[in-house]
Image: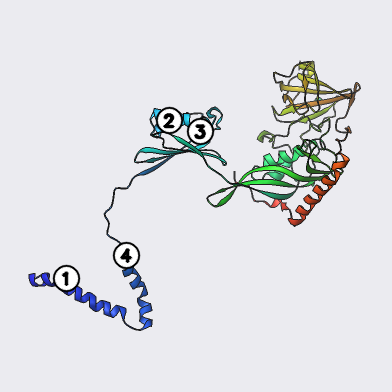
Amino acid sequence: MPLQMKQNLPVILGGAFIIFAIWFFSGSEDELEKREPLRKSIAKLEAEPEFTIAPQPSMDLRKGAFSSEKPLFDQLVDAGLSPQIVQRLVTSLQEDVDFRRVREGVEWELTLFDEVPCQFTLNLSPIDIYDVFDLSVKPVVAKRNIAVSTEIRYYKGELQTSLFEAFSHMPKGIVLAVKVADVFAWDIDFYQDPRKGDQFEFMVETAFVEREGKKEFLEYRRILSGRYFGEKGKFNAFLFEDEKGKDAYYNAEGRSLVRDVLRSPLKLVRITSSFKGQRFHPVLKKKRAHNGVDYGAPKNTPVMAVADGVIEHAGWYGNAGKAVLIRHKGKMLTQYFHLNQIPKGIRKGKRIRQGRTIGYVGKTGLATGYHLHFGMKIRGKYVNPQRQKFQPGAPIPKNRMPDFIARMKEYEDMTVSFKEPIQMALLKPASP
Ligand SMILES: [Zn+2]
């Protein structure tokens, strides 16, 4: 380029720009519209200020989870914290967190800026999240304020193969199945009574937490009302406070569902995979000349005292293997045979409450497979516990009946407001 031209370059360019600008900012509206994108991009260019790139602080997020293989201390040292900082961090959290009891899999996050540790977060549970700031100076702990909302859900289901199967598509379905079964534990033996086609419905308080603008399932709270219509009979449950203000369940006549004797000596627990082949009748229905009911159940299923009483025997008992015998009021005696283990506190002469675990299913003594032999004697004679009619629960006092009736009406209005219960069979499989 000739020197002359080089010197004039700004002038030439400037002139060109002016000509371009005249062209650009004139013309019909139509043309202007067409040029709009171009104009915008120029405006953008003009708006963008010149800057020099400042060195960016590097942010680093490290994550981990509690594990029995590597203590948290070592994990955090590996993540870049000095042992002193880890010590300070753990000490700062000790008031809120019992580290010995933190479950495996609980997640933590560590944020570092330019290799300097800034923030540690412990996700103890969806509602217990702790942030620790100023790690390298003096750690400050803050618990996050998590909003929990509750909604009432109304479900309906029908048994096809088992109670657990009916709940299997729901989040924490096993927990919910046990919750529902617990309400009816004095009326229904969920190991023996359910039949295909039995129907049930219930309303349950369901808690959610907000996370990143989305509602996330947290847990089930109280069952408000429930119904079980099966071969065994029709059963209703309504939540109402007892005289002491404690939540309790009553039937439509206002009688407490709690009775002196539980329907089943087996705690309803998740049936393990080895038990899958068993469908409705986990009972070894052998007509042996023995007095009692046999419950086929997985090894170590907890066995409960069906009623308050005093232990008459706990230990080896001939062909019955490890056994527990309990004496109850009303001249009733219950027997629990073939146990695998008996807890330490279960000893002769000890007074125990209904529902207390008195042993675990085994096959000790004369038993071919894991099962509980459950026997019941009244006034010295064997009776069939399944056909036994036990005392109905206590009624609500007359002066509180109007309140109870009003409460039942409230529940009914609620179910009507839902129009249709959620059909459990139509629920999509829950993600694990
Ligand atoms: Zn037996």
Lower position in the chain sequence, tag 4 or tag 1? 1
Give the residue drawn at x 83%, y 24%: 334
Across and down, in percent, residue 175 comes to 68, 39
Across and down, in percent, residue 117 comes to 39, 37
- Between the C-alphas of marks 3 and 2, the distance is 15 Å
Within-10-Å neighbours for mark 3: few <14, some 14–19, many 20+: some
Lower position in the chain sequence, tag 1 or tag 2? 1
- Between the C-alphas of marks 4 and 1, the distance is 22 Å
Question: What is the secondary structure assignment of the residue under circle 3?
Answer: loop
> In the displayed structure, does residue 191 sit left or right of residue 134?
right
Between circles 1 and 3, the one closer to the viewer is 1
**For residue 114, which quarter of the picture?**
top left
> In the displayed structure, does residue 275 sit left or right of residue 134?
right
> Which residue, as the protein is rendered here, is positioned at the far front?
399
Please state which amino acid type lies under the numbered disc 2.
Val
Residue behind mark 3: 66
Residue behind mark 1: 10
**For residue 22, which quarter of the picture?**
bottom left
Please state which amino acid type lies under the numbered disc 3.
Phe
Residue behind mark 2: 86
Residue 37 visible in the shown view: yes
Please state which amino acid type lies under the numbered disc 4.
Ala
Within-10-Å neighbours for mark 4: few <14, some 14–19, many 20+: few
Within-10-Å neighbours for mark 1: few <14, some 14–19, many 20+: few
Confirm or deny contact between disc 1 and disc 2 (CB under 8 A). no
Give the residue drawn at x 27%, y 59%: 50
Lower position in the chain sequence, tag 4 or tag 2? 4
Q: Quadrant of the N terminus?
A: bottom left
- Between the C-alphas of marks 1 and 2, the distance is 63 Å
- Between the C-alphas of marks 1 and 3, the distance is 67 Å
Question: What is the secondary structure assignment of the residue under circle 1?
Answer: helix
Confirm or deny contact between disc 1 and disc 3 (CB under 8 A). no
